[in-house]
Image (cartoon, rainbow, N blue to C red):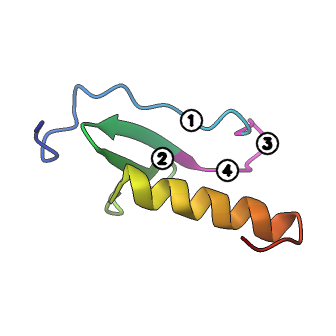
Amino acid sequence: MESLRDLTRARWRRPSHDGDTGGYCVEIVTVSRHVTICDFKDLDRPAFTFTRNAVTAFVRATASSESGTRR
């Protein structure tokens, strides 16, 4: 498993819906089976690391809640 401690060489990316209008403010990096999310407008805050399964479950729950359905 890759180390989650050193993310300095990681390729961070912004969500595709992130714009230059002050909207979303996160960057994401995937390391091994984990996803780390940080607030790129305030890098003094800690980054949060989740398993890919947890992120997938969160996205699915959010998408179903936005569409008014529950799974």
Residue 14, disc: 1
Residue 24, disc: 4
Q: Who's the residue at 73% across and 48% down the image?
A: 22
Q: Who's the residue at 36% across and 25% down the image?
A: 11
**Label 3, label 1: how far apart the Cα atoms are:** 14 Å
**Label 1, label 4: how far apart the Cα atoms are:** 9 Å
Residue 62, disc: none
Residue bearing the label numbered 2: 40
**Label 3, label 4: how far apart the Cα atoms are:** 9 Å
Give the residues drawn in magenta, as a range: 18-26
Q: Check whether the beta carbons of the residues at disc 3 and disc 1 lie within 8 A of each other.
A: no
Residue 22 located within the stretch drawn in magenta: yes
Q: Quadrant of residue 64?
A: bottom right
Q: Is residue 36 above or below residue 68?
A: above
Q: Check whether the beta carbons of the residues at disc 3 and disc 4 lie within 8 A of each other.
A: no
Q: Observer-nearest residue: 6 or 30?
A: 30
Mark 2 is on which residue type?
Phe
Q: Label 4 neighbourhood size at 10 Å, few (<14), some (14-19), many (20+)?
A: some
Q: Is residue 34 above or below residue 54?
A: above
Residue 53 spot, x, y in % from top left: 41, 55
Q: Is residue 27 left or right of residue 61?
A: left
Tag nearer the camera, 3 or 4: 4
Q: Check whether the beta carbons of the residues at disc 2 and disc 1 lie within 8 A of each other.
A: yes
Q: Label 3 neighbourhood size at 10 Å, few (<14), some (14-19), many (20+)?
A: few
Mark 1 is on which residue type?
Arg
- Quadrant assignment for the N terminus: top left
**Label 3, label 2: how far apart the Cα atoms are:** 14 Å
Q: Quadrant of residue 16?
A: top right
Q: Label 2 neighbourhood size at 10 Å, few (<14), some (14-19), many (20+)?
A: some
